[in-house]
């Protein structure tokens, strides 16, 4: 039996160690550690040699040991409200694409729009000594804020352009986006514009505030035009909402849905009911989800920069982790009104 270093394993666990990789690569363990972390100071030829040795041995880094050595792990905690909305799937894919080249992995949690669940996830996941946090929104409860402050872990907030001192954020103004869509409907001559919303999370309520602002300015605000349902957003719910709104508010000439899945369901319901869109009633959505441009008629909506938010927020967080200066703690990426046939 060969006694080469390639066969050397700790007796207790049978696990290939950093020292094993160092012996095969002919370098020190600290050089292996730095090379595998992607530190720029390590010569490219040494990095290639270390990577080849690690691959040959099947070396898998020990995250617990790395966390003890560096006071934090190679993980970044990412908390999102849900995974059933493509909005967050697109965002997560962008986060992962940006993290991996720097040697970090996502440690993901789903909060279900529940501040208490978010608090519990933070309490559990901060035990892993993450290098950073990416959180959706800025509405964390007091206990969560205390946990974050005590941990000292850098954090960037997603989906909102928040200009509060001490907060790093990447997003856009949900309120302004809601106002712009409402203004578009007013410019099309619509006067009885319903705002139809589900889930009723903080960003949905900000869009509602934008809708209220524009209708108030136009002298057309009517609280009875708010159609709010705390149930999870879905195409089926959107169809049900559309039927209920048209029955209860027959003078409605436009419906602004807080999310595209609701609006898509409404367009399908209108087809089944034989109601012409936009001739009888205009329909608008939010987020420009997959399929919105293929609806009959194509859906007018607000395109949100979800992939760009994921990439930019992750890049900001990596700068914070590396102790680099941030040009602006609040990065507003804006949004785009996608005017199509439904309005």
Image: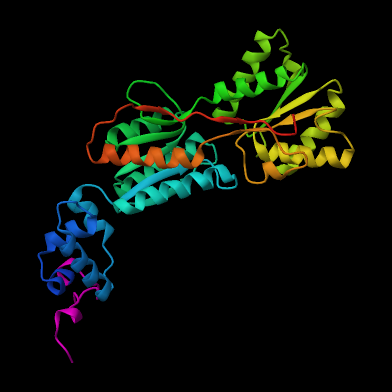
Q: In the rendered image, which quarter contains the C terminus?
A: top right
**Residue 161's quadrant in the figure?**
top left
How many marks on residues? 0
Q: Residue at x 30, y 51 (%)?
A: 102
Q: Residue at x 12, y 73 (%)?
A: 23
- List x then y, in percent, for residue 260: 66, 38
* Chain part drawn in magenta: 1-20
Residue 90 appears at what percent x and percent y? 52, 46
**Can you name the residue that lies furthest to the bottom here?**
1
Judging from the image, the colouring scheme is rainbow
In the figure, is residue 213 to the left or right of 275? left
Pick the quarter of the image with the N terminus. Answer: bottom left
For image coordinates 59% across by 44% down, the residue present is 85
In-image side of 300 versus 85 (left or right) = right
Residue 256, by quadrant, is top right
Residue 248 vertical position relative to residue 52 in the rendered view, above or below: above
């Amino acid at each position: 039996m060969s006694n080469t270093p390639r066969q050397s394993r700790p007796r207790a666990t049978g696990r290939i160690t950093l020292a094993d990789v160092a012996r095969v690569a002919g370098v020190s363990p600290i050089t292996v550690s730095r090379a595998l972390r992607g530190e720029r100071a390590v010569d490219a030829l040494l990095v290639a040699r270390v990577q080849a040795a690690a691959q040959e041995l099947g070396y898998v880094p020990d995250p617990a040991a790395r966390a003890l050595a560096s006071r934090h792990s190679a993980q970044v905690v990412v908390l999102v409200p849900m995974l059933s909305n493509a909005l967050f799937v697109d965002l997560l894919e962008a986060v992962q694409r940006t993290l991996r080249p720097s040697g970090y992995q996502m440690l993901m949690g789903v909060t279900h729009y529940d501040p208490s669940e978010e608090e519990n996830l933070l309490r559990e996941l901060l035990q892993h000594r993450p290098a950073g946090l990416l959180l959706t929104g800025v509405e964390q409860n007091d206990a969560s804020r205390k946990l974050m402050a005590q941990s000292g872990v850098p954090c960037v907030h997603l989906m909102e352009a928040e200009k509060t001192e001490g907060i790093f954020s990447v997003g856009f103004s949900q309120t302004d986006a809601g106002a712009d869509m409402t203004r578009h409907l007013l410019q099309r001559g619509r006067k009885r514009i319903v705002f139809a919303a589900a889930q009723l999370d903080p960003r949905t309520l900000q869009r509602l505030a934008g809708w209220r602002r524009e209708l108030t300015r136009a002298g057309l605000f009517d609280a009875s035009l708010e159609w709010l349902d705390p149930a999870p957003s879905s195409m089926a719910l959107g169809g049900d909402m559309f039927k209920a709104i048209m029955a209860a508010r027959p003078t409605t000439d436009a419906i602004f849905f807080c999310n595209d899945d609701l609006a898509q369901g409404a367009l399908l319901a209108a087809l089944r009911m034989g109601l012409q869109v936009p001739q009888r009633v205009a329909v608008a959505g939010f987020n420009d989800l997959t399929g919105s441009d293929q609806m009959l008629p194509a859906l007018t909506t607000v395109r949100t920069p979800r992939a760009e938010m994921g990439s930019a927020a992750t890049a900001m967080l990596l700068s914070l982790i590396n102790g680099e200066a941030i040009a602006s703690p609040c990065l507003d990426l804006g949004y785009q009104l996608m005017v199509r046939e439904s309005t």
